Image (tube, rainbow, N blue to C red):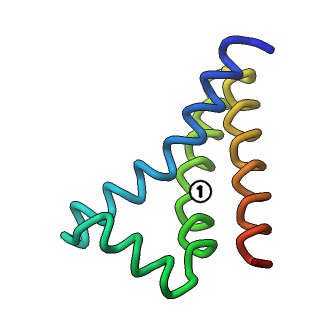
Amino acid sequence: MNNQTITGFVVGLVSPFVAFSVYVLFFLDLDLFETLYKIVEANKLPHIISLSLLINLLIFFMKIKTNRDHAARGVLGSTILYGFLIVVLKFI
């Protein structure tokens, strides 16, 4: 496994949470942990995760455009892992 693939995988895992945090803290001006608690309580976590994964789409295409195919492979792998998580959360 290439070092760039691992870096892309980590970036793909972290970026949806960072994007969601930036949206909640700066645009909605709410408390992050209180908002997460309300989302989990309302059983909307899979919806929020899938919307947060849109940032991975942007990162994936940026990596492809700049010929960083191994890093794009890592981002794609983390997105697939999030997909499995969403399926599991939907059926629990």
Say which of 59 and 92 sits in front.
Answer: 92
The residue shown at (53%, 60%) is 52
Say which of 75 and 65 sits in front.
Answer: 75
Q: Position of residue 61 (x, y in %)?
A: 64, 40
Q: Position of residue 86 (x, y in %)?
A: 71, 66
| Direction from residue 26 to residue 90 in the image, left or right | right
- Residue most extreme to the bottom: 42
Q: Position of residue 14 (x, y in %)?
A: 51, 41
Say which of 48 and 43 sits in front.
Answer: 43
Say which of 25 and 66 sits in front.
Answer: 25
Quarter that holds the N terminus: top right
| Direction from residue 72 to residue 35 in the image, left or right | left
With respect to residue 13, does 26 lie above or below? below
Residue at the spot of label 1: 53
With respect to residue 25, does 16 lie above or below? above
Q: Which quarter of the picture shows residue 25?
A: bottom left
SS state under label 1: loop
Q: How many marks?
A: 1
The residue shown at (48%, 84%) is 41
| Direction from residue 69 to residue 62 in the image, left or right | left
For label 1, count other residues whose C-alpha is less than 10 Å away and answer few (under 14), some (14-19) or many (20+).
many
The residue shown at (60%, 39%) is 12
Which amino acid type is marked by label 1? Leu
With respect to residue 78, does 36 lie above or below? below
Q: Position of residue 30 (x, y in %)?
A: 22, 71
| Direction from residue 16 to residue 90 in the image, left or right | right
Quarter that holds the C terminus: bottom right
With respect to residue 37, does 50 lie above or below? above
